[in-house]
Amino acid sequence: MRVDLFPLTTRVERAAGRARLTVAGHDLRALAERYGTPLYLYDQATMDDAVAGYRRALARHYPGESGLTYAGKAFLCLALAQWVRQRGLWLDCTGAGELGTAVAAGLERERILVHGVNKAPADVAAAAAQAGTVVVDNRTELQRWVARAQEGAVLPNLWLRLQPGLAVETHAHTQTGQAGSKFGLGPEEAWEAARLALVAGLPLMGLHLHQGSHFGDPTPLAPALETALDLVAALRAELGWLPTVLCPGGGWGVAYCEEDLPGPPVEEYVAFVAARLREGCARRGLPLPRLWLEPGRSLVARAGVALYRVGTVKEAAGRRWLLLDGGLADNPRPALYGARYTALPVEEPGRPYVGSASLGGPYCESGDVLIHGLPMPDVQEGEFVAVPVSGAYQLSMASNYNGAGRPAVVWLREGRVQLVQERETPADLLRRDRGLG
């Protein structure tokens, strides 16, 4: 059922003679009217449940030490970073901007990790000052850390990012591990980088790899882990070095529409990685490293709901359009790589469908279509619709296209609603401008 894609606390409740969607006990129509639309909701209980699921799976399947890093690129704001701190997670930041959010949220240095394929000098300086771990992507970056060490600076722990030469099955735009990718070091480059780091006395502690985002088949992880462990065995034999941490990244997928249900179970992913790592280390006589996973989407995607108001209903060449007050500017994923979503009207969501409808946004692009040909009830102008699984890679990639202000964000808990990001205004859009003298 479509409602099964919504946060765990979602209910259909009857009030004033009408059935309405609620999340964490809060009426979605009331929230839309109070805060305006487009509006994004985050359900904390769903996020907490996702973290608990990962931790149970790791405890069940991996005998060594393990942990989780929340991938901030999925969505990051001050409240989200505070939740990361409260749940004892690490936070993955890319660049000085996300680092600033992590520090403002009170995250301890040792739980801040920095990624980046081309870290600017300002990013490196911020990482050196504020992060406990930095993932080194390339030789140029490594030379910068060598230079800092030669100047007597105290460095964060360093991991090397390995390009394993194989991506997972996902959209080409979200694959990262294949040969020729812009990310990471090939096995021979990684070996040489490790040698250089050790000769320079750098605090080299871990090995990282990532093969892509939003995948549901863990099979391609096996040869990548084999490549990583072959590298570890060679480094031990030739340089006497072993990583204390091995991170195979994250990217496990979620269900976005009815056809995806029930969605790939997290335990299948964790069990697969843990088993391959245990077996691979045993065959090579290697000690088990700390296993560190980097989920982002699978922690927050289902927790998020986007609310829109239907402004216009129109027919064009037999196609029914529900035109919304948001779309491409707050969720570019359908336009970028054909991401699929579903939706329900906030009131009387169980109404019978009367045919298909396409949900489009207000922006001056033909590609501004959130959903194509979705079976929908007879939705009228002025109604609110809710798009589930909107918690990841939407607001983090939002823009001000056509002068759009980015939406407000509210955080939901039982009995409590908290505005955690204000809606952007025209004045906000002008704040950086200086004009001509």
Image: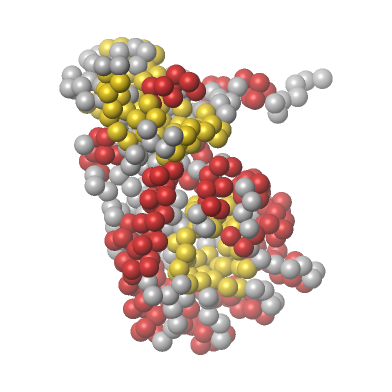
Q: Is residue 163 left or right of residue 265?
A: right
Does residue 53 appear in the picture of this structure? yes
| Residue 41 left/right relative to 97 | left
The N terminus is located in which quarter? top left
Residue 351 sits in quarter: top left
Q: Position of residue 274 (x, y in %)?
A: 36, 70
Q: Is residue 117 visible?
A: no
Look at the picture and state if 169 lies above or below 397.
below
Choose top left, top right, bottom left or bottom right for residue 30.
top left
- Which residue sits at x=39%, y=80%? 281
Q: Position of residue 426 (x, y in %)?
A: 62, 20
Q: Position of residue 325 (x, y in %)?
A: 44, 20
Q: Residue at x 47, y 75 (%)?
A: 289
Please, which residue is most extreme toward the right here?
Answer: 437
- Can you say which quadrant of the picture contains the C terminus? top right
Q: Nearer the viewer, residue 118 or 356?
A: 356
Which residue is the extreme one toward the front? 415
Closer to us: 243 or 190 = 243
Q: Position of residue 421 (x, y in %)?
A: 56, 33
Q: Is residue 175 left or right of residue 2?
A: right
- In the figure, residue 2 lies in which quadrant? top left
Instruction: From this view, report whether residue 182 is shown above or below residue 362.
Output: below
* Residue sitting at x 41%, y 54%: 51
Q: Is residue 171 above or below residue 3?
A: below
